Amino acid sequence: MMAPNFAWAKDDWLDINITGVTGKLSRNVKAHLGSNPESEVQRRAYLFTVEDNINAALESMGRYHSEVTTDIIETDKGPWKLNINIEAGEPTVIQWIDIKYNDEMLEDNSFNRWLNQLTVKPGDVLDHGVYQNLKTQLVTLALARGYFDGKFTRADVVVNRDLNTAKISLHFESGQRYLIGNVEFTGHTLNDDIMERLIPFEPESKYSTQRLNRLNRNLIDTGYFSNIKVLPQIDAMTDVDVPIKVDLSPRPTHSFEIGLGADIGTNAEKTIDPRVRLTWRMPQINSYGHTQETTMEWSPDRPKFLTTYTIPLSHPLDDQLKLRVGLLRDKYGVTQDYNPDDKSYDYTGQLESEKRLIGVIRQQTLDNQWLFGYSVEFNQEYYTQSNIDYDPKFLLAGVGIGKTKRGDNTLDPKSGFRQIYSIEYGDPNLGSEVRLTKLEAKFKWIDTFFENHRIVSRLDLGANIADSDELAQISPSLRYFTGGDQSIRGYGYQELGPFIEYTNDDGSTSRQVVGGRYLVVGSIEYQYYLNDTWRVGTFVDAGNAFDTDQFEPVVSVGGGIHWISPIGPIKFDLGVGLKETETVDRSWRIHLTMGTDL
């Protein structure tokens, strides 16, 4: 059945109406006809070639028996009218596809994988654009794999117009596969040994752009350089290899980054809890690749200072020694005094602590991409609990291992899985206040179903193994509390957990959330992408910190809107607590956060 009329273009010189074709055929016809004429001379040339251009468009898509009729209506004033009717005829069908290659390419599995993913097959309608794309893909893959002498010995489409069939033949002679020659770095001030260790392949490896991309990725991940160009020197290649030139530009000596966040809503103390973070980095301190990062964070009554000095060891990325010094003040839980007049507890503050730490950490990336680390950290923490001052010291030896698998390298990955396991141990014989074994496991899973539907889930587990009568000597920063944008949204930062009752200095009863020895917190969030830069989400968070036989799960629900900015997602979430505990009323919180999920 003939397609309905439609107007393609109108201007002062020619109105064009096409009937008879739709979809890809129609689009191809319009592409071959080109732009509308803009003068009388152009109009004459356009009309002279219109049938040839239409036939070329149809034949390129396997229509060799088409009939094209044109009707030109000339006018003294205004545009002429061109009516085009097309009967496309029967399509030409592919009878066979013969793709052959030889030489070293036969042993290269990349080409077998390419063949296996091709969708064109016998029985498809002939499309010369698809044929040209096959040729381009094969040549592009050959160049990417180092077959610079490769050439087609046969590349044609044989059409039988009587039978409306076509045979595609592509025969490729690859020649030898070239090797990667000398890699020359320019524009840097690092030790040559460091640069050599960043090359992720052996000398005289077989050429591939994938290997060069890994080199480029390594250079980016160091953070040393602001501009990186990995340039194969094709004009300078020998009979066997291709030299590589890498042009580099160092980053500025100092860089600064500011982060903002806030929790807004009802909780035990206040309705707003702003956070400001300033990060100062020196991406390259000397020719040995040393770096430093200092983070200063301000939040009411919770200032933090942490500096990390990193020294590359056997590899700039895969083996690093980190020296860490910090001074951190924080608040935990809630403190309440009993009011006998209304038989309730009034908020009086929180458990406050000041922590000083010095740590040494070695991190190594294993061959299977697990990140393995071991550490020694000394910390001393000052706090008052149940009207008693404490200042315990801990010397903790730790071991941790983790792995993050991302579906892509964007700041907003569509899929991924992160798992982290750690153990820390402190002993009185080695300088710790009490004997403590700290076990933790953290998981995060992301997946995108269909196209715009994303699921983010997480699970955090922790346990402090120590004598039950020594909990007060375990520093608050080593215990477990819940609440906040990275825990149970809808409640204030670290305000949930087990509490104790005691007699205060006035002789009345007080109670204080002091944290627990165990932690179980989970979350699941559904997110829907409205477009490439905006999404909405809804979540359920649940869990709590607890002691033996005291697990009291707390649940919060909520949702928000997220902007996928160039520097990472910025999230505006509202969480509502569904449970009223003995120390915290049912509350709601607005969380403004920024950062990637993995």
Image (cartoon, rainbow, N blue to C red):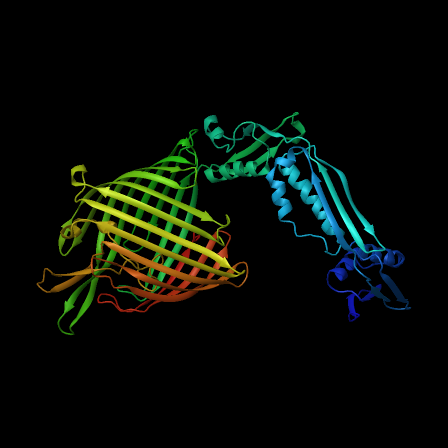
Query: In the displayed structure, does residue 544 sit left or right of residue 93?
Result: left
In this rendering, the count of numbered labels is: 0
Residue 352, image quadrant: bottom left
Q: What residue appears at the point 38 percent right and 45 percent down from the top-left corner?
A: 402
Query: In the displayed structure, does residue 375 sit left or right of residue 250?
Result: left
Q: What residue appears at the point 83 percent right and 64 percent down from the top-left corner?
A: 86
Where is residue 560? Give x, y as percent: 43, 64
Where is residue 161? Give x, y as percent: 84, 54
Q: Which quarter of the rendering shows the N terminus?
A: bottom right
Residue 247, image quadrant: top right
Where is residue 481? Give x, y as percent: 26, 56
Query: 489 or 271: nearer the eye?
Result: 489
Relative to 559, say whether 367 is above or below.
above
Where is residue 168? Give x, y as percent: 76, 47
Query: In the displayed structure, does residue 130 sit left or right of residue 550?
Result: right
Query: In the displayed structure, does residue 379 sit left or right of residue 501?
Result: right
